[in-house]
Amino acid sequence: MEWVYPVLWLVLIILFVVLEAATVQLVSIWMAVGSLAALLPAVLGMPVLIQIAVFLIVSVLCLISTRPFVQKVLAVKKTHTNADRVIGKTGLVTETIDNGLEEGRVMVDGSSWKAKNADDAVLEAGTRVLVKAIQGVTLIVEKA
């Protein structure tokens, strides 16, 4: 029966490594490290409670000490598209904006966009507007 717990910890190591490889979230890898640490007391024949305590302590310490750093390094940076660049810019209403009729166009940076008014008021052609947001391919604007 002495061999059961070392084998269990080896199986858990493999399981956590495979799980990490499948998800790439850097969570289960710390449990693989904890399982590796718990393997030592298992091989030395220490009680199961000590093995579990070693597993938990090492896993939590690894997670706490390295996860913020790893998340910072692996952080996905938001890439602005060309559409995002018009937010905050001023445009000119080229076709009357009427949210009720779902009509209206605005010229911003040389491009014509479908537009809606943020406060539902009708904006006549020739009115200067400020782009507040984008919903799909429609600019949300307000009178400048």
Image: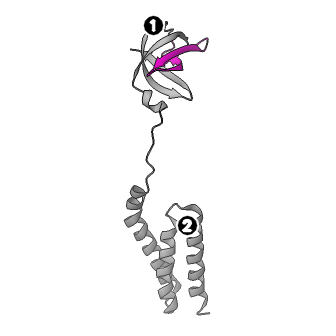
At x 44% / y 27%, what residue is drawn?
86
Magenta stretch: dominant secondary structure: strand
* Pick the front one: 23 or 92: 92
Q: Quadrant of the C terminus?
A: top left
- Image position of 108 with respect to 128: above or below: below
Q: Look at label 2 and name its amino acid.
A: Glu
Q: Is residue 99 visible?
A: no
Q: Quadrant of the N terminus?
A: bottom right
Q: Is residue 137 magenta?
A: no
Q: Which mark is residue 126?
A: 1
Q: Is residue 78 visible?
A: yes
Where residue 84 appears, as percent x and y from the top left, is 46, 32
Would you identify the image quadrant in which residue 98 lies?
top right
Point out the stretch of residues depicted in magenta.
100-120
Q: Could you tell whether 63 is left or right of 99 in the image?
A: left
Mark 1 is surrounded, within 10 Å at the Cα level, by few (under 14), some (14 to 19) or many (20 or more) other residues, namely few
At x 49% / y 63%, what residue is drawn?
26
Among numbered discs 1 and 2, the one appearing first in the sequence = 2
Q: Secondary structure at mark 1?
A: loop
- The colour mode here is one colour
Where residue 105 appears, as percent x and y from the top left, is 53, 15
Q: Is residue 106 magenta?
A: yes
Residue picked out by circle 2: 20
Q: Residue furthest front?
A: 110
- Image position of 138 with respect to 96: above or below: below
